[in-house]
Amino acid sequence: MASQPQPISPVKNFFAGGFGGVCLVFVGHPLDTIKVRLQTQPKPQAGQLPLYSGTFDCFRQTLVREGVRGLYKGMAAPIIGVTPMFAVCFFGFGLGKKLQQRNPDDILTYPQLFAAGMLSGVFTTAIMAPGERIKCLLQIQAASGEIKYGGPMDCAKQLYREAGIRGIYKGTVLTLMRDVPASGMYFMTYEWLKNILTPEGKSVSDLSVPRILFAGGMAGIFNWAVAIPPDVLKSRFQTAAPGKYPNGFRDVLRELIREEGVSSLYKGFTAVMIRAFPANAACFLGFEVAMKFLNWIVPSL
């Protein structure tokens, strides 16, 4: 069983989640850039070497060609989108928990926490899908050297001009397929580890910073263990030329399996896992710090 040390407040979750999301982007964006470039690199011709031999080679080439700024390409889009997205994500989780409680002091089971987490994944897709589309396009254009978009707003304008709102929301179904189960795993793992790490007789709200960081980092790893295959499909689909995959993710999946095998669904695995721990540790620490601050200034909210 999981324990809730105080009444659940979706409103507080909203504001604390937004702050946690900003912390996550600052820590995790460089490796997200590496992940997307690995996932979308072109298949090498016969006798040719791949553009990147792996995570560390991609990191090295990016630094040499573009400097540190290259690792933060496209960060404006997730920063603009991630604050409301994580706010909505944590709000959805708080609401999902509250909807399952008959009384404010009810303790939720882990399957109930998983269900609440899945609801948060549904909530965030409306913000996540266009932000991810723009981010991926900006990240790969920097690697290819072909500059089509001047920045996030220019990218959004061009996508809208070329294909309307559907162009901006390309990949929404794949974003749902990634985020709904992964968010369930994310929040359930965090709550489970917090309970395990809480000393007997103590409250989860009194956890030390290292234990919060560990629980948050491991939650990120469990999240991405579920999310990587649909994320690979999403990145490939969102950055493909218009009309390349008329049947959506099924065409992407068939092409990847046929040309590169099942292992291609785990492209960028190393970059994702290296990023997952520190980025999500920072996210949950930011969330917990913001929640304590909000509980202090508005305890009745």
Image (cartoon, rainbow, N blue to C red):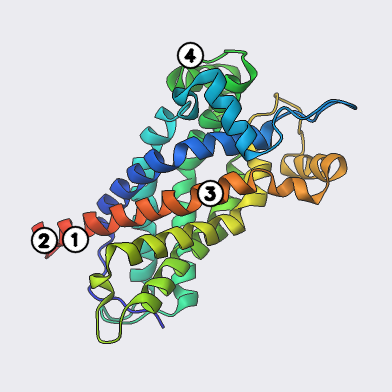
Tag in front: 3 or 4: 3
Tell whether 295 sits left or right of 107: left
Q: Which residue is mark 3?
A: 274
Q: Which residue is mark 4?
A: 150
Image point (37%, 77%), residue name:
195
Question: From the image, which quarter does the C terminus lie in?
Answer: bottom left
Which mark is nearer the camera, 1 or 3?
3
Count residues near mark 2 (Cα–Cα under 10 Å), then give few for <14, some for 14-19, many for 20+. few
Image: 44 above or below 231: above
- N-terminal of the pair, mark 3 or mark 4, is 4
Q: Amino acid at mark 2?
A: Trp
The answer to whether residue 172 shows anywhere in this view is: yes
Identify which amino acid the numbered label 4 is placed on. Answer: Gly
Q: Measure the alpha-carbon separation of dots 2 and 1.
A: 6 Å
Q: CA distance from mark 2 to mark 3?
A: 34 Å
**The N terminus sits in image quarter:** bottom left
Report the Cα–Cα distance between label 2 and label 4: 43 Å
Q: Label 2, secondary structure: give it.
A: helix
Q: Circle 1 sits on which residue?
A: 292
First-in-chain label (2 vs 3): 3
Mark 1–mark 3 Cα distance, whole angstroms, equals: 28 Å
Whichever of labels 2 and 4 marks the residue nearer the N terminus, that label is 4
Judged from the image, the secondary structure of the residue bearing numbered disc 3 is: helix
Where 22 sits versus 223, above or below?
above
Provide the residue designation for mark 2. Answer: 296
Residue depicted at x 47% and y 54%: 277
Which of the pair 274/294 is nearer the observer? 274
Pinpoint residue 100: horizontal percent, then vertical percent. 39, 74
Mark closest to the chain's N terminus, 1 or 4: 4
Label located before the other in sequence (1 or 3): 3
Residue 77 lies in quadrant: top left
